[in-house]
Amino acid sequence: MSLKLHDICALPLVAGALMCSNIATGQELKISPDNVLSQLPAYNGTDLELTVDNNSTRFTLWSPEARAARVNIYDNNNTPTPSQVLEMTRGANGTWTADVDRPLYGKFYTFQINFDGRWLDETPGVWAKAVGTNGHRAAIIDFAATNPEGWENDRGPVVKNINDAVIYEMHHRDFSVHPSSGIVNKGKFLALTEQDARSSLGDKTGIDHLKELGVTHVHILPSYDYNSVDEANLPSNGYNWGYDPLNYNAPEGSYSTNPADPAVRVREMKEMVKALHDAGIGVVMDVVYNHTADNDKSNFSLTAPGYYYRHRPDGSYSDASGCGNETASDRQQMQNYIVNSVKYWADEYHIDGFRFDLMAIHDTETMNRVARELKEINPSIFVYGEGWTAGDSPLPVERRALKENVARMDGIAVFSDDIRDAVKGHYTDAADRGFATGKPGNEETVKIGIVAATAHPQVDYTKGNNSKFAYASSPTQIINYVSCHDDLTLTDKLAKSLPDKSVADRQRAAKLAQTIVFTSQGTPFMFAGEEIFRDKKGVHNSYKSPDSINAINWELKKENADLFNYYRNLIALRKAHPAFRMTSARDIANNIVFDKTDAPNLISYSIKNNANGDEWKEIKVILNGADSDALVKVDKADWIVIARDGQINPDGLDTTRGGNMTVPATSALILARVK
Ligand code: CA
């Protein structure tokens, strides 16, 4: 996610109440102190804000501290005056309701509350499931009419364990907007529905490319309605990662072909999910409940001022997100909100997984509830997140959904910054090198990655660069990766850390780096386009950079066909062999045996005992990150050579009897034997 500046609360504490001012507007909201907010009644119904059927429309707003509340009904998204204003009646558990004895399909609405004696700005609420252009008004649509044909039978892939997945992280616009993509609906949800797309040089792109590569899940960057891209002015103001949430429960309008029609974005996102499911590919959504784009003007603030956020002792917004505020999952209604929101996406859109941005801003209890209730909807759904914050938080460390606390989170995985930084060099220093790029001292941390941060008798955690203890209790708690949308792409990192090397040499390092990721225990994760050596022209924080930086040029697929084929075979190898996908720490400790190696940047290990039911009795993985060839001694046996010197074939490149073998500089040697 990106860092940016927001309004800053600047007024000092006023006795008896917390004061916070939005400097831009000069408005002040008198917020109750935390101990009062924490005691407000919560409401866990799934009927909040709008329910509509053929006979009636009901509005239900949760706003326990409002003095009065109303609904403004509009005939369209733009008309300045409401056609009707409904006064709401106070209900149970902090709610307000208003009823209309007919269905209001086609209308738009906003809520408004009277708080501390004055009417706040209009808001679509926090549960708007359909919105008009730029998400300022909620819309009343018939969701059943948005379902694509065959939707009732639509299912994502069955996933027994998260580490059976191969995750491909992509941004809609990066993936399809380049003129070479051969895709008609560039930058749209529909891009992922187009069959038979070909690049200008004839290679498969779009969904056909994903199938050819063999990934099991796409992880789409934020696709809920975010704030920054002007949907009324497309495509000129066209790019943002989307880590600036506006409406959490409606799709982003700029990814639809018509943001002005609230049903179109809903239908098109479902069509995308269906097309991916039909291709056997699951959809993981990146969710950003940890902060909102605005502070006092957010939908949270305009429905229940102060409640959904954490504050500092002086009353200002605390900012563990680095984006101006942080939400308060430790408050019951915020926890209910997060849980019910992801469940809604799973139910209505058939989403197969959720990636939590800055997950450690949330508490472990909330995350455990998220995972548990999602599994009740669909056992194949999985959850992972960033086990860190971007700043300090009032939430006690022991309650945070941190990487270090993952053993206390059942069914949640965290990104391993251990393997990421150890393999390619630290993310904060572009020139820094890692294990795969010839810098010694990262061997033990790579081994931490190989065993998915579980306890292993041959891994010395005191020598870990980042983590100093085996924080995972199961390999299903770890996501392995070397790059993602944040920071330099792998291509750019290799260019900056190996400036004197040729592109061919950098691609050798890329192959080695990803071989480590895809053969390690845990779940592999890659950034879209790495397989064809996409770059971002050295821009490390491209969250609002133009397409010229972010778009994937699909002509690279021809130029880097060898690299693409390496990725494809690497993925096929992993999918064919459960030994790379063990599901318990005990199995890893029993079946993985590291060989003694004294040379720097050299790791050699075996996966033994037909691990996890594998047909291969033993797999030997030798990783040479040094700049020179390594000589290793391999047991005499009938080995199949799976990978050697930058080539890989899951069915075997060759055979060998073992003995003294050479592992060329910056490459992996993988051997397998059946008996
Ligand atoms: Ca938007």
Image (cartoon, rainbow, N blue to C red):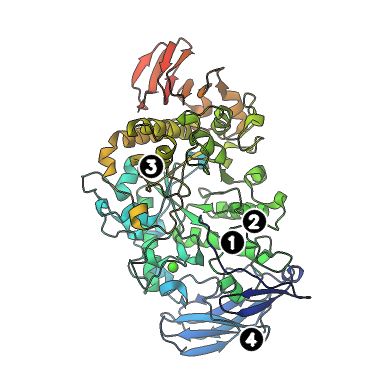
Q: Decide: few, some or many residues near mark 1? Use Cα within 10 Å; few <14, some 14-19, many ≥20.
A: many
Q: Disc 3 to disc 4, how far (Cα)?
A: 53 Å
Asked whether disc 1 touches disc 2, contact meaning CB atoms under 8 Å apart, the reply is yes
N-terminal of the two: label 1 or label 3? 1
| Disc 2 versus disc 4: nearer the observer | 4
**Percent x, y of residue 401:** 64, 50
Q: Is residue 640 visible?
A: yes
Q: Quadrant of residue 330?
A: bottom right
Given residues 525 and 195, the one toward you in this image is: 525
Q: Which residue is mark 2?
A: 366
Q: Nearer the viewer, residue 580 or 375?
A: 580
Query: Callout 4, which amino acid?
Result: Arg
N-terminal of the two: label 1 or label 2? 1
Where is mark 1, residue-wise? 338
Residue type at the position of mark 1? Ile
User: Which numbered circle lies on residue 530?
Assistant: 3
Local SS, label 2: helix
Task: List the residue tagged with mark 4.
Answer: 118
Give the secondary structure at mark 1. helix
Q: Cα distance, mark 2 to mark 3?
A: 34 Å
Instruction: Give the amino acid at mark 2.
Output: Thr
In this rendering, the answer to whether 618 lies above or below 130 is above
Q: Secondary structure at mark 4?
A: strand
Task: Determine whether label 2 and label 4 are within 8 Å by CB.
Answer: no
Q: Residues within 10 Å of mark 2 (few under 14, many from 20)?
A: many
* Rendering coords of residue 283 (x, y %): 43, 52
Task: Indicate the quadrant of ligand 1 in the picture.
Answer: bottom left
Between the residue at mark 1 and the residue at mark 2, the CA separation in whole angstroms equals 8 Å
